[in-house]
Amino acid sequence: MGDVYTMTNKEENLLHTIAFSMLEGVSEKQKLIMLRHYGSATNIYHLYKKNNSLWPSHAAEDEINFITKHNIDCFAYLDNDYPNRLNNISDPPLALYTKGSTKFNLPQLISIVGTRQHTYQVNKVIQELLEGLQHLKMGVISGMALGIDGIAHALSLNNKIPTWGVLAHGLDTIYPNVHRRLAINMLSNGGLITECRQKTITMPYQFPKRNRIVAGMSDATIVIESAVEGGSMITAKLARGYDREVFAVPGKIHDAKSKGCLWLIKNNIATLYHDPIHLLENMNWPGQNKIAQDEALPIMSDDLKIQSLLLTLPPILQSIYLLIQ
């Protein structure tokens, strides 16, 4: 007989987290409260063993089989490798499925969002933004939608900046279908992220839920163009609610595609975006010259550091130090 495979604690907790996320009759808010109180979905499972017939273990096992077959990673809320920025929002996903790179805990992450129906200037604005920030160890998050989202992902790849697309459906499909090739290319430098399981039927309410992940994973959200209503405005308001920075590109006052950005600026939800240097200063991120200077500085040995420190001491203390060496 072959050896019986025993799950690790991490694998067991992932299975129970996926099952817990599927559990009916309990709101997501209540589930988060329970997880924070009991520490893990495994603890909750063992606590309520008498009622575990309601626990959707078989459905969770099917999901585990799917993600294993397709090399998909899944991160359970409260795990050490869960995206660190999402830990700091009020409504993080219980389970997060990712395909591609999982190195999204970078020093800087921005989200670039905007309307599907945009003007000709957005390519130039996004390209200049990325060129001005590519010296950072940064990544770009967006929502894989048509228009500005897709442009942000494509230009990030062109500038060799990792980029992740957050989906409003499972990883068994790509919507919109015209972004399938883009999604494949992103797997080599970034990837795809979703809280939705396979076979999820996309419903309108899932897009704002998707937007909260875009906002929550970012240090700053930049709205390139937007009408007064739309997904980009939802993302900007969520980002502000999470105490993240929001920037908006101003446009012509009578242009419907700029009215959303102007509204965000007028209502102090967003800072007016002028150029990459302005954004770097507002975020207190190093500019290109500062990084170049730091890289050019020689690395001091421990002996040199001690000698440099000695020179700052009074002569009497220098003498005492030398005597005891």
Image (cartoon, rainbow, N blue to C red):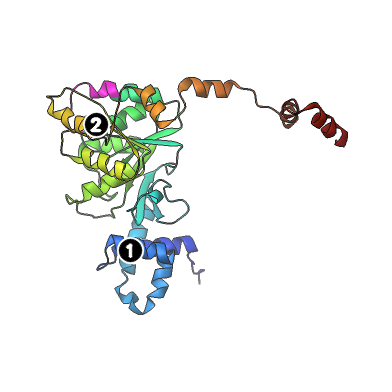
Residue 61 forms part of the magenta stretch: no
Residue 8 visible in the picture: no
Residue 269 lies in quadrant: top left
Of the pair 12 and 27, the residue shown nearer to us: 27
- Compare residues 217 and 198 and report the one nearer the observer: 217
Q: Is residue 112 above or below residue 20?
A: above
Mark closer to the chain start, 2 or 1 = 1
Residue 92, position as x, y percentages in the image? 34, 53
Amino acid marked by disc 2: Ile
Q: Residue at x 34, y 24 (%)?
A: 129
How packed mark 1 is, by other alpha carbons closer than 10 Å (few <14, some 14-19, many 20 or more), is some
Task: Specify the principal SS of the magenta part.
Answer: loop
Question: Could you tell me which secondary element the residue under label 2 belongs to?
Answer: helix
> Residue 242 got which mark?
none
Which residue is found at the position 40% from the left and 53% from the top? 75
Q: Which residues are magenta?
A: 115-125
Q: Which mark is residue 265?
A: 2
Q: CA distance from mark 2 to mark 1?
A: 36 Å
Toward the viewer: 224 or 197? 224
Is residue 228 visible to us here? yes
Q: Amino acid at mark 1?
A: Lys
Quadrant showing the C terminus: top right
Indicate left or right for 225 with 157 as reference.
left
Q: Are marks 2 and 1 in contact (CB under 8 Å)?
A: no
Q: Residue at x 28, y 34 (%)?
A: 270
